[in-house]
Image (cartoon, grey):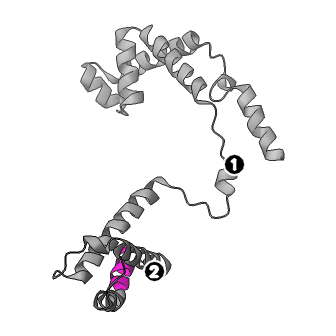
Amino acid sequence: MPVETSIEKQMLSAIPHLRAFAVSLTGDLDRADDLVQGAVLTGIEKIDQFQPGTNLQAWLFTILRNQFRTDYRKRKREVEDPNGAWAEKSFTGPAQESRLDFEDMLEALSRLSVEQREAVWLVAAEGMSYEEAARVCQTNIGTIKSRINRARANLAKNLGIDDDEDLGPTRMIRATAMMETFF
């Protein structure tokens, strides 16, 4: 639907106010201008949803604010990489190996004594300090440290980990990732 002349004038007169609001939200002139442009375009596209007799500028402010919030949520999950350096160095191994490793870890954990499994879980998975884990288990810190040490040794044995080379990606994946840096 074409935009009426009076609504078009109201939209144009709202732009400086929208821009000031966008700058206050972003702190960046370029991003603010992008937000204003997006809000005005969305306003034009959805003009049929505007209720005549209500405040057009407030409606556009709402559109701009919603766009800002959507962009903000997206940016929180994204890593800025303008020249592609981060992406170039990134390597993700196949998901199925990770799943198998996880299942192996669960199996190895199940073979630990209840006390060892409890101590490892509280400290490694829950992030508790040795002192906090000792309080939860109603024992002393030395006992918790001993249980964790034995649990780590048993996990390494159960998982077939002999040295640090056995941790992380497989040798094949590491070699593949190294080859990618040469090309």
> In terms of depth relative to the viewer, which is nearer, 121 or 40?
40
> In terms of depth relative to the viewer, which is nearer, 147 or 23?
23
- Which residue: 71% across, 30% down? 173
Q: Residue furthest left?
A: 53
- Which residue: 30% across, 24% down? 134
Q: CA distance from mark 2 to mark 1?
A: 32 Å
- Report crowding for label 1: few under 14, some 14 to 19, many 20 or more residues within 10 A (C-alpha): few
Q: Is residue 21 magenta?
A: yes
Q: Nearer the viewer, mark 2 or mark 1?
A: 2
> Does residue 119 lie above or below 79 as drawn?
above
Magenta span covers which residues? Answer: 18-25
Q: Which residue is mark 1?
A: 89
> Does residue 142 lie above or below 128 as drawn?
above
Give the percent coordinates (x, y) of residue 81. 61, 60
- Which residue: 57% across, 11% down? 157
> Does residue 2 lie above or below 183 as drawn?
below
Q: Which residue is mark 2?
A: 33
Give the percent coordinates (x, y) of residue 170. 69, 26
- Which residue: 31% across, 71% down? 63
Amino acid on which disc 2 is placed: Asp
Query: Quadrant of residue 68 in the image?
Result: bottom left
Q: Is residue 136 left or right of residue 64?
A: left
Amino acid on which disc 1 is placed: Lys
Give the percent coordinates (x, y) of residue 169. 65, 29
